[in-house]
Image (cartoon, helix red, strand yellow):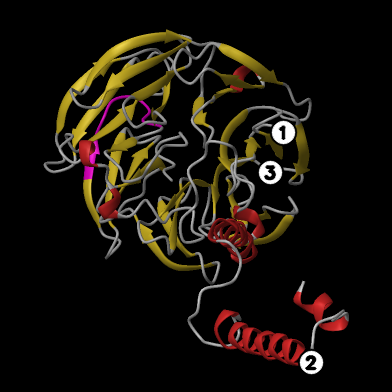
Amino acid sequence: MSRRRARHPGTAGPGVVLCVLLGLLLALAACTSQGSPSSRKGDPPTTPPSRSRTTSASAEPRVAAAHTPRRFRHLLPGMPPVVDDNVYSRTRPQDVRPRLRHEPKLVYVPDSMPSGDTVTVISQRTHKVVRTLHTGLLSQHVVPSYDLRHLYTNSSESNELVQIDPHTGKVSRHIPVPRPYNLYFTPDGRQAVVMVEEHDVIRFSDPTTFRKRYDVHVPRCSGPNHADFSANGRFMVISCEFSGVLVKVSTLSHRVLGVLPLGAGSMPQDVRLSPDGRTFYVADMATDEVRLISASRFRQVGLIRTPSGPHGLYPSRDGRRLYVSDRGAGKVSVVSFRTRKIVDTWTIPGGGSPDMGGVSANGKVLWLSGRYNAEVYAFDTDTGRLIARIPVPGSPHGLCVWPQPGRYSLGHTGNMR
């Protein structure tokens, strides 16, 4: 209005016009010196507070996403976030959940003989057998549940999962499941994945009742048995032992996203993701090597030559090293995640057959079953020295160390995240 009046003064006299012009100039000067956000450092912006908060809130996620590596973005809905761009950052000794800190420190050893129906329970402190649980025939692996409340023995011949209460160390439930060899849980905790190895089936089930939801049949996959999940949880890579291939399966749609043949004579076993989420490490028992598979491209990008028969893969508690059980050589190879090279080798005096197991909660002991020697091995992870050799019945297989640190379990003998 004042500008219109200045251009068209009408009957107003020169004095009025001059006063109006002087008032306008003073008002503009005041606005410039006090109202402009660029004039004085620290002054509030001229936009309304509510609009300012909306703008800054929407900008922050974009900035965070720009600094988050692609492999950690677009997480499986409901999956806990990856911390510090390291999938194992919450599996350190201090990360044992409060309710597990007073659980008995035990080792559960299943007997995988066809006629075996027991799980031998060993004290981590005394290295003595404290009890024997009667589970089911041909017990393959002892697997922590996603919520860390139960352990499940995969009793293949009995067609059941046998639930163990880790607080009491006793059997608490028998669940009918056809030929379970191994058991996994998707990172959101909403699905169990049963490896029905004998029938070449990857079964997605309810994680509590284990009722079937969806079966995945891959014609080129014979003997699905071990697996791990991508850093964002949206797919899993599964080893097919008897056909020498890896398969990539979506955890959402259950579609087969890829099949990777590993070559004649390959026999892939355990699968484990690197801490940075870039690479799947795959133990190939027949070719005596650990294969490195790109998580983004799903193709082999390297390999590590090992002693005979690499079988199990277990990250150290600090996430720097990978322990490889060389079953055919009676040794353990220690691999650096950084250099992708063997930095140490531990030998079982007189030989042995180290198979499956896990690392103690404090990271000081690696426990492994002796598959063909009816014994369990305990290695000092600082020195590599064998500190215990404990006789157990039958053919010990997927040994589980409990408790372990972590927010949740992806299955197997303790793939914690």
Give whichever of 388, 248 is nearer the camera: 248
Mark nearer the N terminus (1 vs 3)? 1
Give whichever of 39, 310 is nearer the camera: 39
Residue 47 in the image: state x and y as whole percent: 61, 66
Residue 337 in the image: state x and y as whole percent: 51, 64
Residue 240 in the image: state x and y as whole percent: 66, 34
Give whichever of 96, 345 is nearer the camera: 96
Direction from residue 28 to residue 107 in the image, left or right: left
Give whichever of 320, 233 is nearer the camera: 233
Mark 3, secondary structure of its residue: loop
Mark nearer the N terminus (2 vs 3)? 2
Residue topped by disc 1? 243
Callout 3: 10 Å neighbours few (<14), some, many (20+)?
A: many
Residue 73 in the image: state x and y as whole percent: 62, 52
**Amino acid type at image mark 1:** Ser
Callout 1: 10 Å neighbours few (<14), some, many (20+)?
A: many
Direction from residue 221 to residue 327 in the image, left or right: left
Compared to residue 125, the image places residue 165 above or below, namely above
Does any portion of residue 365 appear in the rendered image? Answer: no
Compared to residue 60, the image places residue 391 above or below, namely above
Kindly check if marks 2 and 3 are in contact, taking CB atoms under 8 A apart as contact: no
Distance from the alpha carbon under mark 2 to that under mark 3:
100 Å
Direction from residue 175 to residue 21 in the image, left or right: right
Distance from the alpha carbon under mark 1 to that under mark 3:
8 Å
Residue topped by disc 2? 14
Magenta residues, start to end? 389-397
Q: Going 60% across and 39% down the picture, which residue do you hit?
A: 76
Does any portion of residue 90 appear in the rendered image? Answer: yes
Q: Going 21% across and 20% down the picture, which residue do you hit?
A: 132
Callout 2: 10 Å neighbours few (<14), some, many (20+)?
A: few
